[in-house]
Image (spheres, rainbow, N blue to C red):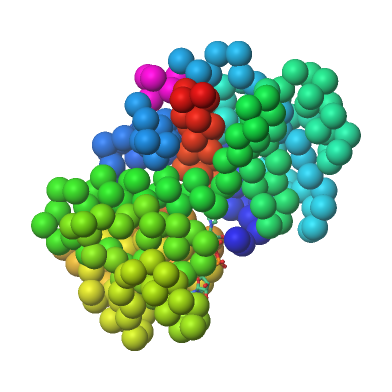
Amino acid sequence: MTRLRYDDIFHISEQLTKYDSDLRRIIDMGLNELGAAAAGANLTELQKYIKGECVGIVPITSGEGIINSFSQTIKSIIDFTGLTSFITNATDVAGIAEAVERKATMLFIADDATCKLLHLKKSIIADNSECTSRGFATALKNKIKNSDKKKITILGAGPVGQMAAKNLKADDIEIIIYDIDKEKMDTAANNLGIGTAKSLQEALDKSNFYFEATTSINTIKENDIKADTFIAAPGVPLGIDETVIKKHADRIITDTLEIGVITMVFTILEKLSII
Ligand SMILES: NC(=O)c1ccc[n+]([C@@H]2O[C@H](COP(=O)([O-])OP(=O)(O)OC[C@H]3O[C@@H](n4cnc5c(N)ncnc54)[C@H](O)[C@@H]3O)[C@@H](O)[C@H]2O)c1
């Protein structure tokens, strides 16, 4: 997981409504519909479980410290789902105590390595990497269902890439994974029962649907974009060449927090709905 910078997130709160309508145009689902679908449920059903829930967002100072505007951005994304939230005045352990005192039913906590939403009474945990992977995979699945070319290339065999493979694996979808670390790639491919490629170019040549989960820039370039290419790209920094982003914006979904955090919320609500 790459540590986010202020520059990666400062725009999110102001642009949530626009991002939501862009997503609706590109994948036929807004952020909340996508989050609910990624949790395996219907949005209207899950919204019934929002009432009475409140998220305490606790700033955490460990590691390299608090990222400017991170807690405010998380609050704006959580509030977009219809949930109530607040940011604690205190940080760390004192912040957790404050959240409980102020009757939070859930805690949002993140450090440089881990990002979780916890339901305090029901002992339910949603993990950001897992939810991000499932959210972006759900969007890609929604696009590939209408295509007759059912092959997906996953770039990056870290937790996010591997969880995407698990989520995308279906009888009619062939998955290829590629990682610059060959040993990691081969181990992941063996465990997951999916294919590999000898090079980045071979991986991209093999399919029209890409899941970009690396930590590198410029992995996908203009000559990798075919007539019906679609890219789900949670990777930070974004592994897509800038000219591709500008020219093919309607064939790319990418963000640094929104889909993952919204999927975390709906993952918890879905679990509440079946308890
Ligand atoms: N957008 C979000 O909300 C969100 C949430 C969680 C993680 N992420 C990002 O998703 C990405 C994947 O997360 P992760 O935890 O699996 O990361 P990771 O660092 O564990 O794995 C990344 C993998 O990509 C491989 N890689 C790097 N450059 C490559 C290249 N040019 N070609 C092929 N493989 C390459 C690395 O060898 C590594 O195995 C990271 O960039 C992370 O920051 C985004």
Residue at 47% of width from left, 23% of height from top? 273
Q: Position of residue 98 (x, y in %)?
A: 84, 26
Q: Is residue 93 left or right of residue 158?
A: right
Residue at far front of view: 275
Q: Position of residue 17 (x, y in %)?
A: 44, 31
Q: Is residue 23 left or right of residue 267?
A: left
Q: Say if 26 sits above or below 183 in the image.
A: above
Q: Position of residue 129 (x, y in %)?
A: 54, 52
Whether residue 45 appears in magenta in the rendering, the answer is yes
Which quarter of the rendered picture does the N terminus lie within? bottom right
Residue 34: image quadrant is top left
Q: Main secondary structure of the magenta part?
A: helix
Residue at 65% of width from left, 21% of height from top? 54
Q: Is residue 272 visible?
A: yes
Q: Is residue 179 visible?
A: no
Foreground residue among 77 and 139: 139
Residue at 60% of width from left, 13% of height from top? 52
Foreground residue among 39 and 252: 39
Q: Is residue 1 left or right of residue 234?
A: right
Q: Say if 19 sits above or below 226 in the image.
A: above
Q: Say if 159 sits above or below 70 in the image.
A: below
Whether residue 87 appears in magenta in the rendering, the answer is no
Q: Which residues are magenta?
A: 43-47
Q: Position of residue 274 (x, y in %)?
A: 46, 25
Residue at far right of view: 94
Foreground residue among 69 and 193: 193
